[in-house]
Image (cartoon, helix red, strand yellow):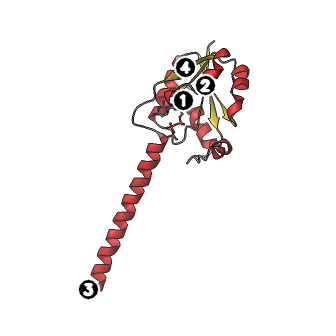
Protein backbone atom coordinates (compact mmCIF):
# COMPACT_ATOMS: atom_id res chain seq x y z
CA UNK A 1 0.00 0.00 0.00
CA UNK A 2 1.69 3.18 -1.23
CA UNK A 3 0.42 6.42 0.34
CA UNK A 4 0.76 9.82 -1.34
CA UNK A 5 0.44 13.03 0.68
CA UNK A 6 -0.17 16.55 -0.61
CA UNK A 7 -1.25 19.97 0.68
CA UNK A 8 -3.16 22.97 -0.62
CA UNK A 9 -6.04 25.39 -0.22
CA UNK A 10 -8.13 24.06 -3.12
CA UNK A 11 -10.37 27.14 -3.17
CA UNK A 12 -12.87 27.44 -6.06
CA UNK A 13 -12.07 23.83 -7.01
CA UNK A 14 -11.06 23.83 -10.67
CA UNK A 15 -9.73 21.55 -13.46
CA UNK A 16 -6.09 22.11 -12.40
CA UNK A 17 -6.97 20.69 -8.98
CA UNK A 18 -8.79 17.68 -10.49
CA UNK A 19 -5.88 16.83 -12.81
CA UNK A 20 -3.30 17.21 -10.05
CA UNK A 21 -5.27 15.00 -7.65
CA UNK A 22 -5.78 12.36 -10.36
CA UNK A 23 -2.06 12.24 -11.17
CA UNK A 24 -1.17 12.18 -7.47
CA UNK A 25 -3.49 9.25 -6.86
CA UNK A 26 -1.92 7.42 -9.82
CA UNK A 27 1.45 7.61 -8.05
CA UNK A 28 0.18 5.24 -5.33
CA UNK A 29 -2.80 3.44 -3.79
CA UNK A 30 -4.02 6.02 -1.29
CA UNK A 31 -4.07 9.84 -1.46
CA UNK A 32 -4.27 11.98 1.68
CA UNK A 33 -4.68 15.75 1.44
CA UNK A 34 -3.81 18.42 3.99
CA UNK A 35 -6.29 21.23 3.36
CA UNK A 36 -5.14 24.66 4.58
CA UNK A 37 -7.43 26.04 7.26
CA UNK A 38 -8.80 29.60 7.07
CA UNK A 39 -6.70 30.51 10.14
CA UNK A 40 -3.51 29.17 8.54
CA UNK A 41 -4.28 31.06 5.31
CA UNK A 42 -4.86 34.24 7.31
CA UNK A 43 -1.27 33.99 8.63
CA UNK A 44 -0.16 34.00 4.96
CA UNK A 45 -2.41 37.00 4.17
CA UNK A 46 -4.66 34.75 2.06
CA UNK A 47 -8.44 34.67 2.28
CA UNK A 48 -10.31 32.00 0.35
CA UNK A 49 -13.77 32.48 -1.17
CA UNK A 50 -14.93 29.10 0.16
CA UNK A 51 -14.61 28.44 3.88
CA UNK A 52 -12.50 25.51 5.10
CA UNK A 53 -15.47 23.15 5.76
CA UNK A 54 -16.73 23.51 2.19
CA UNK A 55 -13.27 23.04 0.68
CA UNK A 56 -12.92 19.84 2.74
CA UNK A 57 -16.35 18.60 1.66
CA UNK A 58 -15.50 19.14 -2.01
CA UNK A 59 -12.13 17.39 -1.65
CA UNK A 60 -13.80 14.45 0.14
CA UNK A 61 -16.28 14.17 -2.74
CA UNK A 62 -13.40 13.82 -5.22
CA UNK A 63 -12.93 10.15 -6.15
CA UNK A 64 -9.12 10.44 -6.12
CA UNK A 65 -8.98 11.62 -2.49
CA UNK A 66 -9.05 9.01 0.30
CA UNK A 67 -8.68 11.30 3.31
CA UNK A 68 -8.56 15.02 4.15
CA UNK A 69 -7.01 16.50 7.29
CA UNK A 70 -6.39 20.12 8.35
CA UNK A 71 -3.15 21.94 7.54
CA UNK A 72 -2.69 24.34 10.43
CA UNK A 73 0.94 25.37 10.11
CA UNK A 74 4.14 25.05 8.06
CA UNK A 75 5.88 22.63 10.44
CA UNK A 76 3.40 19.78 10.79
CA UNK A 77 4.48 17.89 7.65
CA UNK A 78 7.00 15.47 9.24
CA UNK A 79 4.37 14.43 11.83
CA UNK A 80 1.68 14.03 9.14
CA UNK A 81 4.02 11.96 6.95
CA UNK A 82 4.73 9.66 9.88
CA UNK A 83 1.10 9.38 11.05
CA UNK A 84 -0.19 8.66 7.52
CA UNK A 85 2.81 6.41 6.73
CA UNK A 86 3.25 8.35 3.50
CA UNK A 87 5.70 7.06 0.89
CA UNK A 88 5.48 10.03 -1.50
CA UNK A 89 5.13 13.74 -0.75
CA UNK A 90 3.96 15.48 -3.91
CA UNK A 91 2.98 19.01 -4.94
CA UNK A 92 2.51 21.02 -8.14
CA UNK A 93 5.72 22.42 -9.59
CA UNK A 94 5.04 25.96 -8.37
CA UNK A 95 6.60 24.52 -5.17
CA UNK A 96 9.77 23.08 -6.77
CA UNK A 97 12.60 22.87 -4.24
CA UNK A 98 10.51 24.15 -1.33
CA UNK A 99 10.09 20.74 0.31
CA UNK A 100 13.35 19.01 -0.60
CA UNK A 101 14.27 18.92 3.11
CA UNK A 102 11.60 16.20 3.57
CA UNK A 103 13.56 13.86 1.26
CA UNK A 104 15.24 12.00 4.13
CA UNK A 105 11.77 10.93 5.33
CA UNK A 106 9.79 10.47 2.10
CA UNK A 107 10.13 10.58 -1.69
CA UNK A 108 9.52 14.20 -2.77
CA UNK A 109 7.88 14.73 -6.18
CA UNK A 110 6.78 17.91 -8.00
CA UNK A 111 4.26 17.47 -10.82
CA UNK A 112 3.75 19.97 -13.68
CA UNK A 113 0.80 22.30 -13.11
CA UNK A 114 -2.08 22.48 -15.56
CA UNK A 115 -1.49 25.53 -17.74
CA UNK A 116 -3.71 28.64 -17.80
CA UNK A 117 -5.91 27.97 -14.77
CA UNK A 118 -5.61 28.92 -11.11
CA UNK A 119 -7.86 30.02 -8.26
CA UNK A 120 -6.41 33.51 -8.75
CA UNK A 121 -7.48 33.42 -12.46
CA UNK A 122 -11.03 32.33 -11.55
CA UNK A 123 -11.26 35.10 -8.95
CA UNK A 124 -10.04 37.66 -11.52
CA UNK A 125 -12.56 36.39 -14.08
CA UNK A 126 -15.48 36.69 -11.66
CA UNK A 127 -14.30 40.16 -10.67
CA UNK A 128 -14.02 41.31 -14.30
CA UNK A 129 -17.50 39.93 -15.09
CA UNK A 130 -18.81 41.83 -12.09
CA UNK A 131 -17.10 45.02 -13.28
CA UNK A 132 -18.61 44.52 -16.77
CA UNK A 133 -22.09 44.20 -15.28
CA UNK A 134 -21.59 47.34 -13.18
CA UNK A 135 -20.53 49.20 -16.35
CA UNK A 136 -23.64 47.93 -18.20
CA UNK A 137 -25.92 49.06 -15.35
CA UNK A 138 -24.21 52.47 -15.25
CA UNK A 139 -24.68 53.01 -18.98
CA UNK A 140 -28.34 51.91 -18.72
CA UNK A 141 -28.83 54.46 -15.90
CA UNK A 142 -27.14 57.17 -18.02
CA UNK A 143 -29.39 56.29 -20.94
CA UNK A 144 -32.51 56.40 -18.73
CA UNK A 145 -31.44 59.72 -17.16
CA UNK A 146 -31.00 61.11 -20.67
CA UNK A 147 -34.52 60.01 -21.58
CA UNK A 148 -36.00 61.36 -18.33
CA UNK A 149 -34.30 64.74 -18.79
CA UNK A 150 -36.03 65.09 -22.19
CA UNK A 151 -39.50 64.58 -20.64
N1 LIG B 1 -2.32 23.15 -9.16
C1 LIG B 1 -2.05 22.55 -10.40
N2 LIG B 1 -2.45 23.19 -11.55
C2 LIG B 1 -3.09 24.37 -11.49
C3 LIG B 1 -3.38 24.99 -10.24
C4 LIG B 1 -2.97 24.34 -9.09
O1 LIG B 1 -1.47 21.46 -10.49
N3 LIG B 1 -3.43 24.96 -12.63
C5 LIG B 1 -1.86 22.49 -7.94
C6 LIG B 1 -0.87 23.33 -7.15
O2 LIG B 1 0.43 23.20 -7.71
C7 LIG B 1 -0.98 22.73 -5.76
C8 LIG B 1 -2.47 22.28 -5.71
O3 LIG B 1 -2.95 22.31 -7.06
O4 LIG B 1 -0.13 21.60 -5.63
C9 LIG B 1 -3.31 23.20 -4.84
O5 LIG B 1 -3.12 24.48 -5.36
P1 LIG B 1 -3.84 25.79 -4.82
O6 LIG B 1 -2.81 26.76 -4.36
O7 LIG B 1 -4.92 25.44 -3.88
O8 LIG B 1 -4.52 26.30 -6.18
P2 LIG B 1 -4.11 27.48 -7.17
O9 LIG B 1 -5.07 27.46 -8.31
O10 LIG B 1 -2.64 27.41 -7.51
O11 LIG B 1 -4.41 28.75 -6.24
P3 LIG B 1 -3.79 30.23 -6.26
O12 LIG B 1 -4.16 30.88 -7.56
O13 LIG B 1 -4.45 30.89 -5.06
O14 LIG B 1 -2.28 30.06 -6.10
How far across and down, in percent of the image, does residue 44 sit?
62, 43
* Residue drawn at 62 percent across, 13 percent down: 2
* Residue drawn at 58 percent across, 38 percent down: 9
Vertical relation: 20 (above or below) 29: below
CA neighbours of label 4 inside 10 A, class few (<14), some (14 to 19), many (20+) = many
Q: Which residue is mark 2?
A: 99
Q: Is mark 1 within 8 Å of ligand 1?
A: yes
Q: Which residue is mark 4?
A: 109
Q: Are marks 1 and 2 in contact (CB under 8 Å)?
A: yes
How far across and down, in percent of the image, does residue 91 sit?
55, 26
The secondary element bearing badge 1 is classed as: helix
Vertical relation: 126 (above or below) 136: above
Q: Is mark 2 within 8 Å of ligand 1?
A: no
Q: Which residue is mark 1?
A: 95
Q: CA distance from mark 4 to mark 3?
A: 69 Å
Q: CA distance from mark 1 to mark 2?
A: 8 Å
Q: CA distance from mark 4 to mark 1?
A: 10 Å
Amino acid sequence: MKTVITYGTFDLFHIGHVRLLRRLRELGDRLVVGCSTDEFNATKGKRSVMPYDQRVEILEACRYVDKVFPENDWDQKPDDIEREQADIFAMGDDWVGKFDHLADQVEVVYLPRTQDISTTDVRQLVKSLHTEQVEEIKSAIDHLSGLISKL
